[in-house]
Image (tube, grey):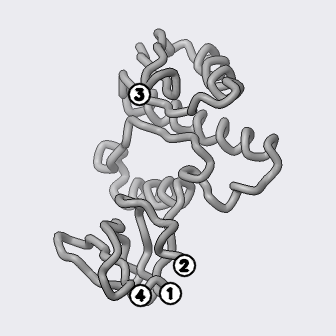
Amino acid sequence: MNIDELWIGDDVLIKASQKKGKFIGKAKDGRARISYNSKILLVSPKNLELITENEKVEIDLKLEDITSSKSHVAFNPELDLHIDRLNPSLSNALPQMILKHQMDRCQAFIQEAIDRNIKILLIIHGKGTGQLRREVQHLLSQYEEFRHSILVNDGGASQVWLK
C-alpha cells in the first residue's frame, strides 16, 4: 500500500494481526502510525490495507449480528459520496457504475438512519455538475420520512432532516 494515499483518520487493517485501527500519520522512518486501543503502532505500509466504506458496512453488520441490537453499533450521520472516499477501487470505473454505487450506498445510509430514528443527516455530494446532488434529492423525495434539506458547505453537501 502506498502510505501517501492514506488520509488522517482512514480506517486500516493490519494484515498480520487482523487489528483494525486509524491512520494518524507517517513516521520519520516511513512506517505508518496507527492508533489502536489507545496505543500508537508503527506498521510497515506492506502490512496495511485500507478499509473502504463497503467493508465498514460489512463490519457493522457483523457487529450487529453479534450484539443483536443496532443501538450498540455506532452510526455516523455523515456520508461522503466522493468515490475516492466511498470506494477507491471504483475511481476509474464508468461514470454510470460509479453513480449506481453512490446511490446504492446513499439509499442504504438513509434507510439505516430511518431504522435508527436518526433525524439529521449530512450527505456530502460535492459541487461538480450537480448530477449527484439531483440524484440524492430525488432519492430523498421517495421517502415519506423525508422532511426537508438545505445545501451547506458552499453547495457541496445536503443537510437532511427526517421526521
Locate residue 4 relative to residue 39 in the image: left or right. right
Q: Residue furthest top?
A: 147
Count neighbours of disc 2 (C-alpha within 10 A) and say few if under 14, some if 14 to 19, many if 20 or more.
few
Q: Tell whether label 2 touches label 1 (CB within 8 Å).
A: yes
Read off the residue under disc 3.
121
Q: Nearer the viewer, residue 41 or 140?
A: 41
Which of the two discs, 3 and 1, sits closer to the camera?
A: 1
Tell me the distance, in whole angstroms, between the alpha carbons under discs 1 and 4.
Answer: 5 Å
Q: Amino acid at mark 1?
A: Lys
Considering only order in the chain, which callout, 3 or 2, is on the residue closer to the N terminus?
2
Read off the residue under disc 2.
1
Residue 46: image tag: 1
Count neighbours of disc 4 (C-alpha within 10 A) and say few if under 14, some if 14 to 19, many if 20 or more.
some
Considering only order in the chain, which callout, 3 or 4, is on the residue closer to the N terminus?
4
**Relative image position of residue 68 (x, y in whole percent):** 37, 52
Tell me the distance, in whole angstroms, between the alpha carbons under discs 2 and 3.
Answer: 32 Å
For numbered disc 1, what is the local secondary structure?
A: helix
Which of the two discs, 2 and 3, sits closer to the camera?
A: 2
Q: Amino acid at mark 2?
A: Met
Q: Tell whether label 4 touches label 1 (CB within 8 Å).
A: yes
Considering only order in the chain, which callout, 1 or 3, is on the residue closer to the N terminus?
1
**Relative image position of residue 95 (x, y in whole percent):** 79, 43
Read off the residue under disc 4.
44
